[in-house]
Image: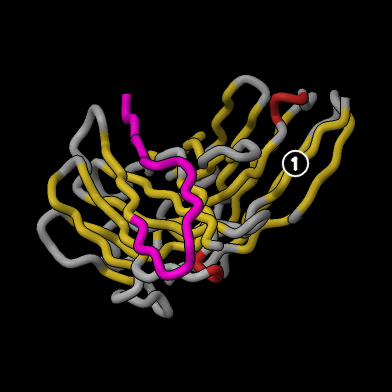
Amino acid sequence: GQQVMQIPQYQHVQEGEDFTTYCNSSTTLSNIQWYKQRPGGHPVFLIQLVKSGEVKKQKRLTFQFGEAKKNSSLHITATQTTDVGTYFCAVNAGGTSYGKLTFGQGTILTVHP
Amino acid sequence: GAVVSQHPSWVICKSGTSVKIECRSLDFQATTMFWYRQFPKQSLMLMATSNEGSKATYEQGVEKDKFLINHASLTLSTLTVTSAHPEDSSFYICSAQVRQHQPQHFGDGTRLSIL
């Protein structure tokens, strides 16, 4: 199945600083999804990227899908304490897998006020 | 929309007890539901894929006799941890999907502690 590497594992920033997490695959992906999990909470779907080179924005969040569809990034501009949590990328396992996802290792974001 | 309810949210029980966790899609019909296990500060590990009316598909290394999954309807899947032991203590999360390759909608999770 599809595998995806996500870095960094941890990121500590001061409020107002930017943050980026990256996901990389050795194979071409059909699409990639991003989720956020607040401490003690459950993952919440943020976005799905499908097209090569796609860039999507949600307020201070910018999502990119690489031209080769092998990597993706999530960038947060001017972080706020409400951005705290773990950000996961997830890719479809492929084949007849009924849409099951393989999650990246996640990046735990801490924002210091 | 796309609300998934998971119950109970917290379970503490003695070793040897069987625990049932329910996952319901409240406002949509889910063709597929997934069960995950998550350890602190780690990623989600898929345990099994559950389709209504058919047997669950378990991931490699997951004991199907230990983790019984029943998907009785398009809105309900249950996970039963049979004869639970302390090593089964974890955070279990379900998710539901309307169609393949669509986003997954997660329940709030169940924190299971076996004494």
Q: Is residue A40 left or right of residue B63?
A: right
Q: Position of residue B70 (x, y in %)?
A: 20, 58
What residue is shown at x 30% (from left), y 61% (from top)? B49
Q: Is residue B80 something that shows in the picture?
A: yes
Q: Quadrant of residue A99?
A: bottom left
What residue is shown at x 37% (from left), y 43% (from top)? B104
What residue is shown at x 72% (from left), y 56% (from top)? A7
Neighbor class of circle 1 (other Cα within 10 Å; few <14, some 14-19, many 20+) is many
Q: Position of residue A105 (x, y in %)?
A: 63, 59
Q: Which residues are magenta?
A: B1-19
Q: Is residue B60 left or right of residue A86?
A: left
Q: Nearer the viewer, residue A52 or B73?
A: B73
Residue on which the image places disc 1? A109
Q: Quadrant of residue A16?
A: top right
Locate the C terminus of chain B by quadrant.
Answer: bottom right
- What's the colour scheme? secondary structure
Q: Amino acid at mark 1?
A: Leu
Say what secondary structure mark 1 lies in.
strand
